[in-house]
Amino acid sequence: MAKGLKDPKEIFPDIIADYKDAFSDDLISIVLYGSATGRDYQPGKSDINFMIVLSEDGIKNLDRAFTVVKKWRKKNVAIPLFLTGKYIETSMDVFPVEYLNFQRNHMPVYGKDILEELSFDPEFVRLQCEREIKGKLLLLRQAFLETYGRGKALKEVIGQSIQAFIAIFNALLYLKGREIPEEKREIISSTALAFDLNSDLFSRLIDIREGKFKPGDIEIGKLFKGYLSEVRKLSKLVDTLGE
């Protein structure tokens, strides 16, 4: 069973066999991505995510994967991303942040390592960072008002939002030409140093997501207001990266 799996590599042979059986020569590659590839992986808690790259003919027949997807969902493996090489090639200007993070946290499982050869236009990366940060700032403000500052509700908002900022931080470090650390707390520290952000605050937010810190309603309200302030600062700073 994949649930609680100590090392995702243990299921690689079966994953390969199942998708080879389903797609035959239309299967181009299988890639593991996300936290399951590194030191942040937590057995039984972290998602196990695969990218399945198919031929143009293969992508037209996704129903071939019904049985395989159903089998592995029961074993705590997320529904894979199904892509084609052409889709990746033509969406680098739209989703550069996602592909940058895929490239940084991936492990080839079968076939061509389609992520390793990707290169990124810095302006496309900056523009997506700007859209993401400014969009998330609006959503965080709305969530703050919708929750009326209630602690439990704010914890849920923090847990759902902070992981997305780690991906954005990776992209911002890339734009600054800084080395991108492997562990998320080091990513926070490096980004805070590069952009004059409050490292302790973002680390606290990660603690809340991971259940390591359980503040009361008043304290979490103050933290969330600080969160809004830091994201607002970042939304202004990202504009200057294009100058």
Image: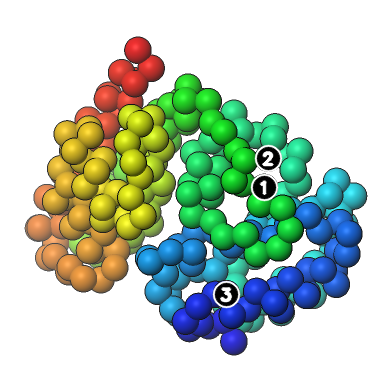
Provide the residue designation for mark 3.
9
Provide the residue designation for mark 2.
88
Residue located at (31% from left, 18% from top): 240
Image quadrant in which the N terminus is located: bottom right
Packing grade of label 3 (10 A; few <14, some 14-19, many >=20) is: some
- Mark 3 and mark 2 in contact? Answer it, CB < 8 Å: no
Furthest toward the top, the residue is: 243
User: Residue 142, which numbered label?
Assistant: none
Q: Nearer the viewer, residue 89 or 130?
A: 89
Q: Position of residue 218 (x, y in %)?
A: 9, 58
User: Residue 114, which numbered label?
Assistant: 1
Q: Position of residue 166 (x, y in %)?
A: 36, 49
Nearest to N terminus: mark 3 or mark 2: 3
Please state which amino acid type lies under the numbered disc 3: Lys
Q: Nearer the viewer, residue 87 or 73?
A: 87
Q: CA distance from mark 2 to mark 1?
A: 9 Å
* For residue 87, side relative to residue 166 (left or right): right
- Mark 2 and mark 1 in contact? Answer it, CB < 8 Å: yes
Image quadrant in which the C terminus is located: top left
Packing grade of label 2 (10 A; few <14, some 14-19, many >=20) is: some
Q: Nearer the viewer, residue 145 or 26?
A: 26
Q: CA distance from mark 3 to mark 1?
A: 19 Å
* For residue 103, side relative to residue 192 (left or right): right
- Give the mark toward the camera: 3 or 2: 3
Rendered view: 202 above or below 8: above
- Give the mark toward the camera: 2 or 1: 1
| Image quadrant in which you'd find residue 86 | top right
* For residue 241, side relative to residue 62 (left or right): left
Rendered view: 141 above or below 208: above
